[in-house]
Amino acid sequence: MSDMRAALFDRYGPPEVLYVGSVPVPAITPEQVLVRVHAASVNGGELAGRAGKLRLVTGRSFPQTCGVDFAGEVVEVGASVTGVREGDRVWGVQRLKTGSMAEYVAISPEKIGPAPQNLTLLEAISLLAGGTTSVTALRDHAAIKPGERLLIRGASGGVGSVAVQIGKLFGAHVVALAGAKNLDFVRGLGADEALDYRTTPLSRLGTFDVIVDTAGTQQSRFRSLLAPGGRMVAVTIDINRPLAGLATILASTLHGSRRIRFFSGNPDTALLTELTRYAENGDIVPVVDTVHPLDSIADAHRALEAGGVRGKHVIQIT
Ligand SMILES: NC(=O)c1ccc[n+]([C@@H]2O[C@H](COP(=O)([O-])OP(=O)(O)OC[C@H]3O[C@@H](n4cnc5c(N)ncnc54)[C@H](OP(=O)(O)O)[C@@H]3O)[C@@H](O)[C@H]2O)c1
């Protein structure tokens, strides 16, 4: 194999900087597998990455690529790999710097799992980032219990739309904060209450045992809504004020168990397999907003940037 198509950009900027170019197909090591990528999705944080707001992390060398999640088929297996075979239908997560919006990814078998058999790969990919992030937030960081009151900020987005479903699966009473046009959408995903984040005063929200924040703004104010013993998990900081955002999270550690817990997801085969089980059981359903061909990657970024997303903008690659 020689070259493949991939989403690239040569400078930070608006969606227009994105193009589909040609790069070498990655060569696998004996410990890796090669996956032909059928689907990937646009994650909220990638917009900031492309715009250059994360350049402390993303650096100055170009071209850069995008995408972290992928779903596809194993086409080559390294000599030392066991338990994975050519033809396996898998999903997984690639490092952002390497990117998943390409025809092939070389990946360690610990970073993939079997894709849900009951879903197309275009449907499945809508659940991956949001699902693994939500399980990590709700189970590992919040230790959520049935009957607890859960607030989800950004409930209609890629993470939030799956967090609503996982919250219900774990038995919580889910209060969803979303834009006015998406309140029915998040109710349809199972939210017990859906409120417009632009018009609902914090004072009307009540208190919560668990808060999952995918928006990143006003984190101190939301932390004050925790009931005694409450836990707040943030999956992002205020991207427009990153240093202030980090300071807010650090300062919150002074509050012990009521600190803002922050993590960066790194799903492994066990977590991906658990998510597949939820999907195959029908506990969670896909949240595809729109499927875009790879050639329309800039349109997909523009659409997510415009706001009002319902779940995920999915990219069809092969
Ligand atoms: N830590 C991790 O492991 C991890 C994993 C995945 C994602 N993330 C991060 O999580 C963030 C969200 O990702 P995503 O893919 O879900 O993004 P997304 O699909 O763009 O969704 C963001 C959602 O937030 C809503 N929103 C915006 N401002 C809000 C506010 N003030 N109150 C309530 N909702 C608000 C938006 O609604 P409207 O469009 O209607 O305004 C949108 O539905 C990103 O920063 C991403 O980098 C972190």
Image (cartoon, rainbow, N blue to C red):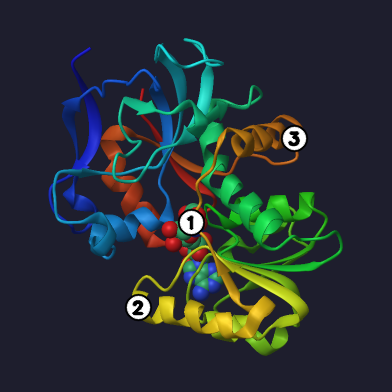
* N-terminal label among 2 and 3: 2
Which residue bears the numbered disc 1? 264
Select label 2 or label 3 by which is in front: 2
Residue 236 spot, x, y in % from top left: 47, 65
| Near-viewer residue (252 or 181) | 252
Callout 2 secondary element? helix
- Number of residues whose C-alpha sits closer than 10 Å to that of mark 2, classed few (under 14), some (14–19) or many (20 or more): few
Amino acid tagged 3: Gly
| Near-viewer residue (194 or 85) | 85
Residue 128 spot, x, y in % from top left: 55, 41
Marks 2 and 3 in Cβ contact (< 8 Å): no
Residue that lies at the very extreme toward the right in this rendered image: 147
Marks 1 and 2 in Cβ contact (< 8 Å): no
Q: Is mark 2 within 8 Å of ligand 1?
A: no
Amino acid tagged 1: Ser
Quadrant of res 224: bottom right
